[in-house]
Image (cartoon, rainbow, N blue to C red):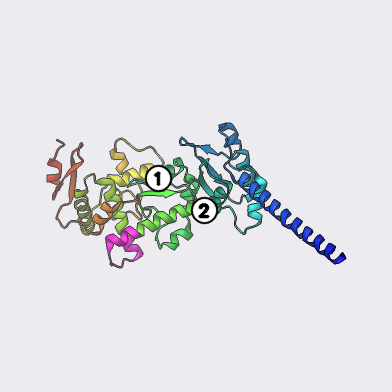
Amino acid sequence: MAGKSFFSHIIRFISFLIALAIIITIAVFAAFMYFNAPAQPVTDTRILAENGGINIMADGSFIFEVRRGESAQSVGRRLERAGLIRNRYFWDVMFRFSDEFVRAGTYRIDPSMTSLAIYRLLVSGRQVLYRVTIPEGMTIRRTAQILEEAGITSAEAFIAAARDPAIIAHFGIPNNSMEGFLFPDTYMFPLNYPAALVVRAMADKFFTQTQEIFGQVNLSPQELNEIVTLASIVQGEYRLAEEAPLMAGVFHNRLRIGMRLQSCATVVYVITEILGREHPSRIFYIDLEIPSPFNTYFVHGLPPAPISSPGAVALRAAFAPAQTDYLFFRLIDERTGRHIFTRTLAEHNSVGLR
């Protein structure tokens, strides 16, 4: 009888443990379902701003930034205060039992997302990307302003990165900046992206594009610099794509006979980028005499470096200029931007505006 009593106690104890395990499992599952359920996001913009500048979008989603070096615990506290997760301790537990970490960047969080879904998003690094367009003919300074206005990176940091000797050496540029070698295009970047990565992305795009344009021609760094410099001048002069090769041909002819290029685009560059003045509405004779290696009215030959970022049309024109005997061109239609091309100074001077 004693043996049966002992075994009955063992069975009851095991039954108790099984029941307890079931209860704990149900409790844990219920807690998980509760804490992982979508929360009630805060819509008060003041509270959102106080918790790290969280922004609510027109579609009801939230833009949330994970700061560089920020811990998962800090992120959890801000998410809880913003009502994007139910409980930061549950959030901490998810990280305690994994080797994942939150990745710095900007993320779009839908209010229907669970804590686990937000966790997966923030450890994945799948950030919100913002479209920014850099037009053709932009200088580094003007590109920096566009990027800063778009919230991609600060203008100061971008300019510093574009002048970073390590980046310049990496791309084999024989100048003291990346001017001309940052391809104008539409890019997708996260907000507050490192300036060095923006510069590298734009330079990578430049070399991808020029490889397509130049084909298998093996150019030395100096030869490439001369083509890009000429392309940047053509970029500042042409308005009709079909005229770009003709303009490049004019400049090639002038270089061949030792004649000054006399490009107004280089004068504007000196005024705005070197002297730091406003973009002139008109160029005066005194401007043509500004002493600068970039002023092609003042010096012979090409400037020492590009004056802007040329696009594909200008790069193709500089690489394969039209074969003509033209030495001059003049605008004849301000509305369309059409020029007339002439061989002699007398022909050039006889052309008037329509």
Residue position marked by numbered label 1 in the rendering: 132
Residue range (magenta): 208-224
Q: Does residue 230 appear left or right of residue 52 in this picture?
A: left
Q: Is residue 73 visible?
A: no
Quarter of the image for the C terminus: give it: top left
Residue type at tag 2: Gly
Disc 1 marks which amino acid? Val
Residue 199 against residue 285 in the figure, above or below = below
The image quarter in which residue 173 lies:
bottom left
Q: Residues within 10 Å of mark 1 (few under 14, many from 20)?
A: some
Whole-percent x, y for residue 208 in the image: 34, 60
Left or right, 314 with reference to 56: left
Q: Position of residue 11 (x, y in %)?
A: 77, 61
Q: Is residue 286 left or right of residue 98?
A: left
Q: Nearer the viewer, residue 338 or 26?
A: 26
Left or right: 209 in relation to 332: right
From the top left corner, tell me how far across and down residue 186 is, in percent. Answer: 36, 48
Q: Quadrant of the N terminus?
A: bottom right
* Main SS class of the magenta portion in the image: helix
Is any part of residue 322 visible from this angle?
A: yes
Residue drawn at x 22%, y 53% is: 248
Farthest residue to the right: give it: 2
Q: Nearer the viewer, residue 261 or 123?
A: 123
Residue wearing tag 2? 125
Q: Is residue 219 magenta?
A: yes
The numbered dot on residue 81 is none
Q: In terms of secondary structure, where does tag 1 sit?
A: strand
